[in-house]
Amino acid sequence: MTETIEYWTAEIEKRPAVADLYFKRGCLHYRNNDFGGALNDFNRALALDADYTEARQMREMVREILDFRNFDLYNP
């Protein structure tokens, strides 16, 4: 895989109004278990394109992961 966070960041700097670039970088953050970075990128993609279904789905998945991590199973 030749695409890195730095690669997508450089692409975003060239074309900051392209939602798909944020989505792709968000997916890479997600694969690297950087859920905060992923959530930020998916939110930015949705800010640029409110109809971006995949970004919305990934954002919800990340929110579920973070909600689960923040839930204390032993002390509800």
Image (cartoon, helix red, strand yellow):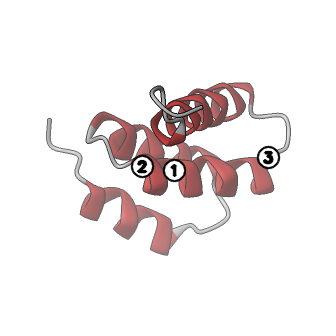
Name the outermost residue toward the bottom: 13
* Front residue of 64 and 9: 64
The residue under label 3 is which amino acid type? Asp
* Front residue of 15 and 69: 69
- Residue 1 as seen in the image, left or right of residue 32: left
The CA distance from mark 3 to mark 1 is 12 Å
Q: Which mark is residue 68?
A: none
The CA distance from mark 1 to mark 2 is 6 Å
Vertical position of residue 8 compared to residue 54: above or below? below
Name the outermost residue toward the right: 50
Q: Residue at x 48, y 26 (%)?
A: 73
Residue 62: name its quadrant.
top right
The residue labelled by disc 3 is 49
The residue labelled by disc 2 is 25
* Coordinates of residue 18 in the picture (x, y in percent): 63, 55
Name the outermost residue toward the left: 1
The residue under label 2 is which amino acid type? Arg
* Coordinates of residue 42 in the picture (x, y in percent): 61, 46
Circles 3, 1 touching at the beta carbon (< 8 Å): no
Residue 9: name its quadrant.
bottom left
Circles 1, 2 touching at the beta carbon (< 8 Å): yes
Q: Residue at x 68, y 52 (%)?
A: 43
* Coordinates of residue 24 in the picture (x, y in percent): 45, 42
- In primary-sequence order, the first of circles 3 and 2 is 2
* Front residue of 73 and 69: 73
Badge 2 element = helix
Vertical position of residue 50 compared to residue 31: above or below? below
Badge 3 element = loop
The residue labelled by disc 1 is 21
* Coordinates of residue 75 in the picture (x, y in percent): 52, 34
The crowd level at tag 3 (other Cα within 10 Å; few <14, some 14-19, many 20+) is some
